[in-house]
Structure formats: C-alpha cells, structure tokens
Image: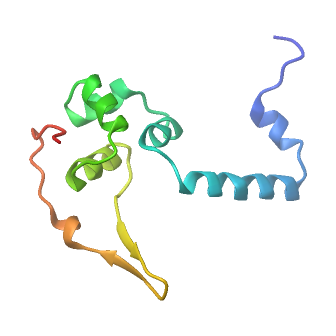
Amino acid sequence: MTGHRSFKELRSTLSAERQARNADATQVMLRDMALHELRVAREKSQEELAATLHVGQPAVAKMERRTDMYVSNLRRYVEALGGKLEITARFPDADVSITNFSDLAIAPEQKLAD
C-alpha cells in the first residue's frame, strides 16, 4: 500500500514529549479495564485463553460477562494472560494487600465455576 505508514513509524515522528504524554495516558487507561478489554490488550482471543484454561470458549465469554465470581476463577483468568492477581483493600489512611487468596490451590481440571 503506497502512501500508508505503520503506526510505529508514525509514532516515531512525534516529539519525545508527545511520546511521553502518550505513554502516560496509556498507563492511565490500562489501570481500569474490564476482563474482555484486558484480554484484548494482552492480544489473546477467547479461544486461545480457553485452551490455556482447559475450558471451552463459551466459558470464557460467560466469565467476561459476569459481575460476580470466585476469586480463584479470576486468578486463573489473570494468570492465563500471564499476570498475577493481587487484591488490595484501599482505606483513606492506608492500602492493605489481602494475602488469604495467594495460597489457594487450584486443580488444573477445575472448571471456571460460579
């Protein structure tokens, strides 16, 4: 395609200050995401995630629509994307990391349950 440039090429023409502002704005947007947005940002399809979790694609779709789920299922989802789930309680005077959930043992064959 003549006359077309890649986004990477276009970005390289921006000033260093503009690139820094864009990077900061990106980090702000990445702080708050729904599960499906997180999956897309990590460049994974529902099918790929389902294969990693040993479940069907419909189970991933259902999980992404849920407003309430087990912490263990959320942790498996995040770990399947290559992350680590940390739970923090925020108070006016302090943030506290909740550690109870880090020791949960999940059998690999366990399905994404309610």
Camera-side residue: 68 or 84? 68
Residue 58 picture quarter: top left
Q: Is residue 47 above or below residue 78?
A: above
Residue 64 picture quarter: top left
Question: How far across and down, in percent of the image, does residue 10 sit?
Answer: 84, 35
Question: How far across and down, in percent of the image, does residue 85 sit?
Answer: 34, 59
At horizontal 38% and vertical 53% (from top left) the residue drawn is 83
Residue 102 shown left or right of residue 22 in the figure: left
Camera-side residue: 62 or 22? 62
At horizontal 21% and vertical 65% (from top left) the residue drawn is 101
Question: How far across and down, in percent of the image, does residue 77 sit?
Answer: 31, 44
User: In the rendered view of the protein, which quadrant contains the C terminus?
Assistant: top left
Residue 54 shown left or right of residue 25 in the figure: left
Q: Is residue 1 above or below residue 55?
A: above
At horizontal 87% and vertical 59% (from top left) the residue drawn is 17
User: In the rendered view of the protein, which quadrant contains the N terminus?
Assistant: top right
At horizontal 28% and vertical 52% (from top left) the residue drawn is 75
Question: How far across and down, in percent of the image, does residue 37 sit?
Answer: 50, 39
Of all residues, the one furthest to the bottom in this rendering is: 93
Camera-side residue: 76 or 61? 61
Count of numbered marks: 0
